[in-house]
Amino acid sequence: MAGIEPPGFYYNSYKMNSKYLYILLLSIAVPLAAAAQQLPDTFRAAPWMQLRDSAHAVVLHQIMISKDCGDAREGSGQRPMRSIDEYVEATPSLSLMSRGAFGKEPMLRGMNTDRLRVTVDGMPVMYACIGKMDPATSYVESNNLDRIEVQSGGDELAFTSSPGGTLNLKTLDPKIGSEDKHYGRAGAEFQSNGAGRSAFLKWGRSSENWGVLINSTWRARDNYSDARGNPIDFSQYRKANLAMALKWRPGKKNIVDADLILDEAWNVGYPALPMDVPRASAQLFTLEWKSYRPRGKSDERSLRFFSNRVLHVMNNYTRDDGSMRMDMPGESAVIGISTWIKWQPGEKQTLRVKSEWMHTTAVASMTMFPEGEKEMYMLTWPDIAKESWAGFMAYTLGRKEVEWEGSLRLETQLSHSRSAMGISQWEALGQDISKPDTRFLGGGGLTWRYHKERTFSLEAKSSVNLRAPTVSEQYGLYIYNASDAFVYLGNPALPNEKSLQISLGANYDNKVLQAGAECYAYAFRDYIIAGIDTNLLPLNDQQSGVKVYRSIKAAHLFGGNVHFRVQLLPHLTLMLRADYVDARDFEGNYLPFIPPLKGSATLRYARGKFDLSAEISGAASQNKVSRYNGEDATASYFLVNVNAAYNYKVLSLKGKLLLTAKNLTNTYFWDHLDWNNVPRPGRNIILSTVIDF
Amino acid sequence: MKRLAIAFILPAFLLAASLSGCKEKIKITDPTENLIAIGSGVNNGYLIEVFSDDSLMTGYNKLYVRVKNNATEEVLNGFTITFAPMMDMGTMQHAAPVENPGKADADGLYEGAVVFIMPSTAGTWTLGVHAEDAQGNVADIDLIPMVGMPAEARILSFESDIDASKLFVSLCAPRNPEVGLNDFELAVHKKESMMSFPPLDGLTIKIEPEMPSMGHGSPNNVDPVSVGNGHYLGKVNFTMTGYWKVNLTILQGQDTVKSHLAFDITL
Ligand SMILES: [Cu+2]
Ligand SMILES: [Cu+2]
């Protein structure tokens, strides 16, 4: 498969000198360890530590059942029916890669789902679309979302070996305890732009030892219009979601949780792509047993079973661009079991051990129907099964105001193709994939935390990660990329991608002022990226050529974000936020799709029944254009969004009425991460209401 | 309790053992089981049977011959077989390229081939089969085979651009093309006269598969090289199912024998 290389590419023969990473890691670890020796070894109860733990590790807060079931958007004054995408976009260090109005791909610290693992309640959900049109975020509804948890800087090692971290969608838990009662909420929304309409109904019942919560959502939107009034064809969607959660407490020290999510989307258009989705379907299921002791030396255990299936039907039947009719379905499935144990060998010492077995499959194909000829069929994901075993261990040692945490993840992954045709297709490309591919993955992390009461904290984290290539990167066959019009071929012999990351974070919170800043840097070795292979020819003359995934010697990424919130007056709050990322290969060339410098300023006035907010958000122009793909420079833009909420009461029912204007000034724009420069919606007036019962 | 368990488990084991025992019986298979009978005849006390892989089509057809003592049904291995195909078109007659079998294989089958250069719709094919052993025992039969037209041509005939001699290029493999790398085998014969079609070795053949409706080809094809007896062996690569065209260019030394030739292959 050798071809004429763009300068700087090199082949798999390159062997990573792993010493390099470890020396770097040690050079950070040693001074920090030395500093730790200086600390007096008196232990104190640290409520802060519990809090920190609950904030960054799912395994810990999962047992915090006393926590009130709350709506993540409650108290923000924002629309209760914001989509998950809107929610993700408003979270620091997260951004969205957009192929249309639906199912945008989340990115964390400038890394997309090739390196970022998206999970639902801790369970990985793999996309079933070769073009990533169906990230896991598209299968959860925001009114069923408790919170979005972002783990990075080494914390992700509990869940994945990938360096990009994890984005976990924590769904709402049913209430349990207190008296036997029903509760619920109903809501509806209408958007002027594209006639967006949605409704949801949530119903729950709680009792002393069990709780149930059912959440159903329906959304529909027609083609939206850009700020110049032009309708954007194929930007419509329809979607329905049903989520059921059951919590049962068989004894004081045991909890059983069962979660089922059924999601169906249909008639989904992707204006930036040549294909649409007549059906996208997902079924997600988790069952978990947890045992804990709420007081004293905690001793917690959990056993979890999870499984999900994602189906993605994609074709171009509705496009009349003269191209051949094409079907490109895909399907993915995950099944797994995990256990974790947490105990405290001594005061202020915590040991967490997790083990996980997981089996994932991914298959996708392409069928073309030429007029008057036999149909043409090929696999694009040759039915790849991956089986992995992972063990994770983290040890935390607290000393007065300082806490240390060391973590280690070991993972083996076995992947193979279950399709004889898929193996033949690869044989045709000169590669033998008939034998299983075994990889050793994992990583190690070291974290240092300092805190002063509850107001100030500092955190320094570092980790090394070994990532396996994704199914597309390793086994993908002629996958079309609508951004650069190339077809992509995987590379079965890709070595693991190695990375070293360090991050520093600081937080200050004294009720009036809340400020946080974080910066991070990643150094990659054997960075996986696709490059042009001029020896290979594309499938048709509309395609620019063939790109093959390869390892480049090195790449790096760095960035940071700041967020700031200050209470100006008793009822007036100002919030500021800014995010910056830069990413280059070892020659200084930009990596694909670097999020632009983004910022927002929000002023909120909340008093009595009213909650008003105005936001100015925007992005600087992005001229860091990658030569690796088909992006171009993007202009800066500013948007104004306003929101007014009014709380009312009818009979004994509490309700809320919201009027929102998005893009109030009707700015014509698209973001740098939007594929093929499809303009975003123009002004959109949204009326929504919810009622609690 | 234990006894009860044994009482149940033991018969189960015995049953399983007896069932698996059944399967191990040696099965005597007929070597012609998966072949198609083309015809047979009796001459001088010998039964001559002719088989093929598929029903006969214009192009390269493998034929399998079995010689038996007609009285004892004993399969006889010591014969030499010669094919003599002949087409009667009314005004004229012509033969066809043949590959006469060598020694019989372990099953007593003599494997050879006939390249039918026309379908039976153009005239009447007669296939003479001559068998002769070292002792001078001889048997001759004539068959009237029906030669059909395949959906996609497996033989190309054309005049050489060099000397205007008539050449036949037949596709021997792939018979059942699949996605991936397939053996690609051609047989080339030259028409010396109406009755003589010797194999032609030493040509240079270049192949280029193409999917016309999409406009793409495939990588990693291996041009067929001359392996003797008019055969050329290479590899062809199909990256998906559907209609493919395998384009051929034939050279003799530096001179082009013929270009713009193609086999249509749909899989
Ligand atoms: Cu898709
Ligand atoms: Cu094709």
Image (cartoon, rainbow, N blue to C red):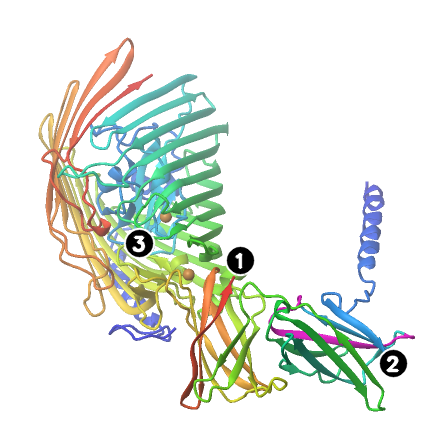
Mark 1 vs mark 2, foreground winner is 2
- Name the residue that disc number 3 marks: A164
Q: Where is residue A629 shown, x and y percent of the image?
A: 25, 61
Rendered image quadrant of residue A47: top left
**Is residue A251 visible in this depiction of the protein?**
no
Query: Which residue is at 47% across, 33% downward?
Result: A257
Residue B75 picture location, percent across and down: 84, 77
Chain label for disc 3: A
**Is the residue under label 1 in contact with that under label 3 (CB below 8 Å)?**
no
Estimate the x, y position of residue A458 in percent, counting from the top left: 21, 48
For mark 1, what is the residue? A418
Q: Secondary structure at mark 2?
A: loop
From the viewer's side, name the closer residue of B193 and A505.
B193
Residue A478 image point, x, y percent: 38, 61
Asked if disc 3 is less than 8 Å from ligand 1, the answer is no
Q: Is residue A82 magenta?
A: no
- Where residue B41 sits, quadrant-wise, is bottom right
Other residues around mark 2 within 10 Å, as few (<14) / some (14–19) / many (≥20): few
* Residue B138 visible: yes
Question: Which residue is label 2 attached to?
Answer: B44
Which residues are the magenta region?
B54-72
Query: How far apart are the two marked residues, 3 and 1, measured between alpha carbons?
Result: 29 Å
Q: Is residue B61 magenta?
A: yes
Q: Earlier in the sequence, mark 3 or mark 1?
A: 3
Distance from Cα at disc 2 to Cα at disc 3: 84 Å
Give amino acid for label 3.
Answer: Gly
Q: Nearer the viewer, mark 3 or mark 1?
A: 1
- Looking at the figure, which quarter contains the C terminus of chain A? top left
Instruction: Point out the residue furthest to the right here.
Output: B71
